Image (tube, rainbow, N blue to C red):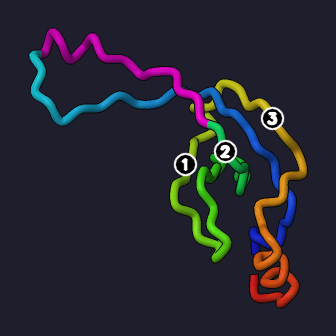
Amino acid sequence: MILKRKKIKVIEVKWIDTVSSMEEFSFEELIEYTPTTSYSMGYLFYEHKDYIVIAFMVHNNYQVKHFESIPRECIKEIKILQKGVSIFNAYGEEMLKSGKY
């Protein structure tokens, strides 16, 4: 399971994001909206050949409140801000030792 990794990286991702809206626009206005460059920072939880998953808020009960799955084809740059970061407190360490996670 992915969470057996005790130490993970904190990263910043520069990526191309979609632009969307629920508002009404004329055809002329609509074509002015183009994809935008976005920056996301968080814990690098998972790397797949097609995408990465970063989490922003991690609770000690192994729940993630906010995350992004970013397609690799949209990623322009990844900066490693910190390596070997532990996201688990003492309670989390005990849960990891139990073998359940």
| SS label for mark 1 | strand
Residue at position x 73%, y 31% from top? Answer: 78
Q: Is residue 52 left or right of residue 32?
A: right
Three-letter code, disc 3: Leu
Residue bounds of the magenta highlight: 27-40
User: Residue visible at 65% across and 25% down?
Assistant: 76
Three-letter amino acid code of the residue under disc 1: Glu
Q: Please provide percent x and percent y for residue 16.
A: 52, 26
- Above or below: residue 82 compared with residue 55: above
Counting residues from the start of the chain, the first of labels 3 and 2 encountered is 2
> Would you name the residue on which mark 3 appears?
81
User: Mark 3 or mark 1: which comes first in sequence?
Assistant: 1
Circle number at residue 42: 2
Q: CA distance from mark 3 to mark 2?
A: 9 Å
Q: How many marks?
A: 3
Mark carried by residue 98: none
Question: Sequence-wise, which precedes: disc 2 or disc 1?
Answer: 2
Q: Which residue corresponds to the image point at 69% horizontal and 33% vertical from the top-left?
A: 12
Going by the numbered disc 2, the residue's amino acid type is Gly
Q: Residue at 62% of width from left, 53% of height from top?
A: 55
Circle 1 residue:
68
Position in image of residue 94 (x %, y %): 83, 83
